[in-house]
Amino acid sequence: MDILKEFLRDEIQSEEEGLDIINFIESFNIRNGEYEGNRYVLKKIDNLNFFIFPEDIYPDGHKEVSGCISIYKTQLLKEIKEWAQSKGIFKEI
């Protein structure tokens, strides 16, 4: 399972979604916290380090995390921008 590729595919389907995620990543006003997407959570540990993991919530209310990656801010931004441009979501960023 490639968590990063699945995160990009599932969470960045429009320019608005992509820009919301980029703004969360780049914001110095958010020192740590979570961006909850459709299925994936992007957890900001500090201004430079992030965790990405799928979070499945079942009808009985229990949650399951089936994997996690850590990624550095510059690499994450690079991956998002390249993926979105390749899919025609971002024209130029």
Image (tube, helix red, strand yellow):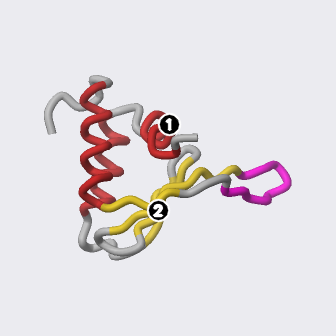
Q: In the displayed image of the protein, which residue is found farthest to the left?
A: 92
Q: Residue at x 14, y 33 (%)?
A: 92
Q: Considering the numbered disc 1 on the image, is that residue within a helix, a strand or a loop?
A: helix
**Does the magenta segment cover residue 59?**
yes
Q: Residue at x 37, y 41 (%)?
A: 17
User: Looking at the picture, how far across and down is residue 10, in whole percent?
Assistant: 50, 36
Mark 2 vs mark 1: in front: 2
Q: Which residue, given by chain and number where applicable, does mark 2 sit on?
A: 51
Q: Crowding near pointer 2: few (<14 within 10 Å), some, many (20+)?
A: some
What amino acid type should be assigned to the residue bearing mark 1?
Asp
User: Looking at the picture, how far across and down is residue 91, in whole percent?
Assistant: 18, 28
What amino acid type should be assigned to the residue bearing mark 2?
Phe
Quick check: 87 above or below 5? above
Q: Which residue, given by chain and number where applicable, does mark 1 sit on?
A: 10
User: Looking at the picture, how far across and down is residue 86, in whole percent?
Assistant: 28, 26
Q: Which residues are magenta?
A: 57-65
Quick check: 63 above or below 91? below
Give whichever of 62, 85 is nearer the camera: 85
User: Looking at the picture, how far across and down is residue 63, in whole percent?
Assistant: 73, 58
Q: Which mark is residue 91?
A: none
